[in-house]
């Protein structure tokens, strides 16, 4: 084992318990403390040659943990803000979609006679099957399909203008 690797192993075992308790105290959460400790020791390992010569090795490690914890906290806050923005945008889109649906509904009501509109509404909006509508109106299911087909054709012609 090289000198710097041996130094790091000894440094790790000598500092781990107290360092973990400190990080847990500053982060307030065990899961975040584990992440900060792991990342701090990873950085310490990469910088082990420089750390060997540092006058306050434990202080360097603790300061590194403070920076890492601050960065993690900022990242989580930014993610929370981004999530809030997405949720606000989705809510606004739902409202817009609702307005557009009402506008389409009003336009279709104006293009069709009341009975045809009611049939169209039951089938496409309320989700009744052709058999259900046929039973309600006292006509055959084939007759319902034919009426719906004629209404769609009528709407296509009126909407092309």
Image (tube, grey):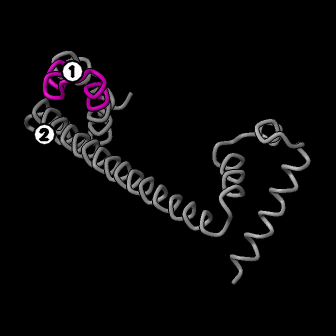
Residues drawn in magenta: 20-37
19, 122: nearer the viewer: 122
Q: Give the numbered dot on residue 33.
A: none
Which image quarter is the C terminus in? bottom right
81, 95: nearer the viewer: 95
Q: Residue at x 26, y 34 (%)?
A: 40
Q: Residue at x 19, y 35 (%)?
A: 65
The quadrant in which residue 8 appears is top left
Q: Residue at x 47, y 55 (%)?
A: 98
Residue extending farthest to the bottom is: 161
Residue 26, compared with residue 133, is above or below; it is above
Where is residue 11? Give x, y as percent: 22, 24
Based on the picture, tell me whether residue 26 belongs to the magenta stretch.
Answer: yes
Which image quarter is the N terminus in? top left
* Residue wearing tag 2: 54
Badge nearest the viewer, 2 or 1: 1
Residue 53 lies left or right of residue 158; in this view the side is left
60, 111: nearer the viewer: 111
Where is residue 136? Give x, y as percent: 76, 37
Where is residue 130? Give x, y as percent: 81, 43
Based on the picture, tell me whether residue 126 belongs to the magenta stretch.
Answer: no
Residue 74, compared with residue 21, is above or below; it is below
Give the main secondary structure of the magenta stretch. helix
Where is residue 144? Give x, y as percent: 84, 49
Decide which of tag 2 and tag 1 comes sooner along the chain. Answer: 1
- Label 1: element kind: helix
Residue 119 lies left or right of residue 104; in this view the side is right
* Residue wearing tag 1: 20
């Amino acid at each position: 084992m090289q000198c710097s690797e041996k130094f790091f192993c000894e440094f790790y075992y000598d500092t781990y318990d107290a360092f973990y308790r400190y990080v847990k105290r500053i982060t307030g959460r065990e899961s975040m403390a584990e992440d900060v400790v792991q990342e701090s020791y990873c950085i310490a390992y990469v910088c082990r040659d420089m750390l060997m010569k540092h006058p306050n090795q434990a202080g360097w490690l603790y300061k590194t943990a403070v920076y890492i914890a601050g960065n993690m906290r900022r990242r989580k806050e930014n993610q929370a803000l981004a999530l809030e923005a997405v949720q606000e945008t989705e809510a606004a889109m739902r409202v817009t979609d609702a307005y557009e649906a009402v506008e389409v509904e009003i336009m279709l009501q104006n293009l069709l006679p009341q009975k045809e509109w009611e049939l169209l509404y039951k089938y496409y909006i309320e989700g009744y099957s052709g058999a259900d509508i046929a039973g309600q109106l006292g006509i055959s299911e084939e007759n319902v399909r034919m009426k719906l087909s004629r209404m769609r054709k009528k709407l296509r012609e009126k909407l092309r203008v």
